[in-house]
Amino acid sequence: LKPFWGIQTRFFDLMIRVLRKRLVASATVVRHGSAASVVDCSRVFVQKDAYDGAGAFAAVPIKRGALVESGIARRLPVDGNRCPYVFTWSEDKTVWATGSGCSVFYNAALDGSENTEMTRVFNENRFEIRATRDIVQGEELTHLYKSIEWRDCFRDLKVLRAVQSKSKTGAPPSVVTKNTLSLVDCAKVYVKVDTSSGVASAFAAVHLKAGEIVETGIVRRLPMDGNRCPYVFSWSEDRTVWASGSGSAAFYNTAVHGNENTQMKRFFEEDRFEIVALRDIKKDEELTNEYKSIKWRPVFEDLKEKLEDSEPGGQSERSSFIEYWGQDHGAPTLENMMLDSGASDMDRLERPEILSMLPSLTGKRVLELGAGIGRFSGMLAQKADSVVAVDFVQASCEENRRINAACTNLEVLQMDATLLEMDKNSFELVFTNWLLMYFTDDEVEAFAQKVLTWLKPGGRLFFRESCFHASGNVVRRFNPTRYRTPEDYSHIFSAAALKNGARFQLVGTNCVESYAKMKGNTHQMWFLWEKVGAASSERRARSLQVNQFSLGACMRYEKIYGENYVHVGGEAVSKQIWEACKDWLKPGARVLDLGCGLGGTVRYLAEHSPGVFFHAVSIDTTMMTVLAGRQVRWPADLRQRISVQLESECGVPEHELKYPPNSCDVVVIREALVYMDAHDQQVLLQKVSRLLRPGGRLVIVDKGLGPGAELDAEFQAYLDRWGYFLQTPEAQKTLLSRHFKIESHLDQTQQFVKFTREGLDLIEEHFGPASSARQRAVDPSDIEKLTEPATALVQKLLPNLPELAAEEAVDAVRKNLALYVESLEEEVKRTQVDYEWAREVWEAECRASEETHFLKWSFTTATKP
């Protein structure tokens, strides 16, 4: 075979260069004005022949000289003397090729009765097959196999021909009735050749719906190495068998970013395939496949590099996710769905808990994504008006349909959720369980935007994900899962918005308790979001505009007030609150913390009050998410005694704080009333009065307005900036006395000033010009000075290392150092911004408290009569 491989070398060098142009830039590129396909087998169909093989037959009557079929040849590194399924493709009989369409299924006529002839254009890699006589519909199409004379693989045919010649008994033409589907059907596809690159590509000849079969065909197994040739399919689980495909199958290019629009289903034992649309495909849109073998076939190394260059994170994460679930964990079992050997026990506890977090489903239309085998689908369908369940794994969809066959209001779709499109305002609930952790960040952002479009106003989105790390105990060959933090999800979904102003509002989040109890795993998190409109309430709009508690701002507050605190005085004030209500904190007591911030106060009280139960209410999405992410890592005793909830409008509207009357022994309100106007403060205090038991304790710590003060422009700007509503001490007492018996109303402005002055010192320490965060660790110009000594060091430690390798090692060090210095520069800039922001705020509060006396700070205790 040595001469054969030598002849092929120049061709394959050229082929690899052409491959560089094969990568499709986008799966949604549409080619307009479809020309005649260069692959045309519309006059031919393929069925089983008289010898139980595959044969080509005339689909229509064909006149002598008329074109029967035209197509493209793919040159292959195979020895045609040993393999009958390839054509001779050079005058010197050393090059071999396979043909498109139905061309490889024309059997030989051994008695001179052949009815077609192939014209081969070697230099253009194309062929035409024409009728050598009139052919009736249904007649088998046959060739004269000229190479019978010299190809070893046709030795048996040569003997058979000799026998027939001696007997002088020619077989009559074989004619069949086309009453079954052709084994090869590519009628919905056409193939065009790019004139600049010479690359042939497949396009949709008609509009195709998601799930529709695009093309069907059969394959010919070839004795060759597909690791060296891109024009064959891997045709065995162990990747040792290769096959060429019929029709247009060989002309589906690959797509970047996992945006392929078709998928090939391979039936190895039957030597056939189906190509299915993964989403709706427009007429004239290029058809693309995922080349899974890019990862391991050397011939695709060039494509792999291109693909990795096109991916933000290197290799295609979408492809990895699909391989992870489509291949490694595609079996439709509960253990596979939950990736845990104890799935049955977990499911009995976990499923009811997840369902208990959902809003009412009565009369609602539900979209379930990542439905798997349907362990939630049936239960959703029992309550909802209708459910659309989507999963991209075919076996899972089939199992879902089987186990939930009785649910006539359940529709199961096989589809990649990243490609899904639904009508606007068509669902009241979108539900997912373990889906987004198999999306890239960009895909989650796109998903958030889509769901906002699909949900009706007021509709809910529920998703549950593994945060921080994996949960199941199933052994994984590899794990592409993205274990995000709750803050990551909060950032993405809080940022999503439509042009009409619609956005998401977090309703609640927490860990899945069944996992915490059975496995000690508190990192299974659920999130419930509501689609809210642009016309939010005034108090909600104020909160959004102020943005006082962004993630960055929370981190600043913690450096000044201490971990888990965004309120003046940090833990010192928490201790004072505990002293004021410790007599009420007996085992079994219940405490409500309104405006809990990052949870510093509620945690302090819980740590010092064994057996007492606490419910913390946050009024800010960001702080709620941070708190929920931290709470799951608290000691089990604290986590079990502290629950957390978000009330986005400070608990004022009728639907918020709907707890039983007389259910709390203590209510704490720390710096929360300041964000409400006088009317809302009155409403909230009335609610608190209803929730407190008779004799229950109320503690309020908040800012106030100095009596009789004429506000100047600077202080008014301060109030407007944060959306504060301040009342004088007398107005505060009057408001409280309507519902409570005031026991003490202490003016603690001097203590506030003390805390603020201490805060200014900490601001200098953490953010000031002399702080470590503001110091440049390395000057960028100093990096270049490392080259010579670093090179000498490498050569000394590794004397046998080639000089070029040493230079590359030093260059890598310099580049990494440059990135590190760049990140330090950005940190210095952020710290300077933090410094200017913090000094401005703290100095303004010091002046307002010490000089103008506009700002007061009070500590109030009261009881319910």
Image: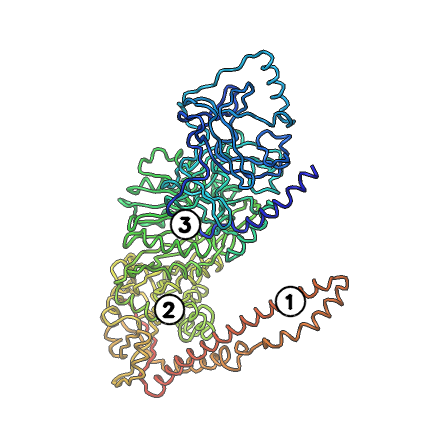
542 vs 416, left or right, is left
- Residue labelled with disc 3: 28
* Marking on residue 581: 2
Residue position for label 1: 811
Q: Amino acid at mark 2?
A: Cys
Please identify, in this view, whether the residue under mark 2 or under mark 3 is nearer the observer: 3
Of 469 and 660, which appears nearest the observer? 469
Give the Cα separation between the discs numbered 1 and 3.
Answer: 40 Å
Upstream in sequence: badge 1 or badge 3: 3
Q: Indicate the position of residue 126 as horizontal and vertical percent values.
A: 51, 38
Q: Considering only order in the chain, which callout, 3 or 2, is on the residue closer to the N terminus?
A: 3
Q: Amino acid at mark 1?
A: Asp
User: Quadrant location of residue 712?
Assistant: bottom left
Q: Residues within 10 Å of mark 2 (few under 14, many from 20)?
A: some
Image x and y of residue 507, in percent: 34, 57
Closest to the camera, between mark 1 and mark 2, is 1
Give whichever of 850, 735 is nearer the camera: 850
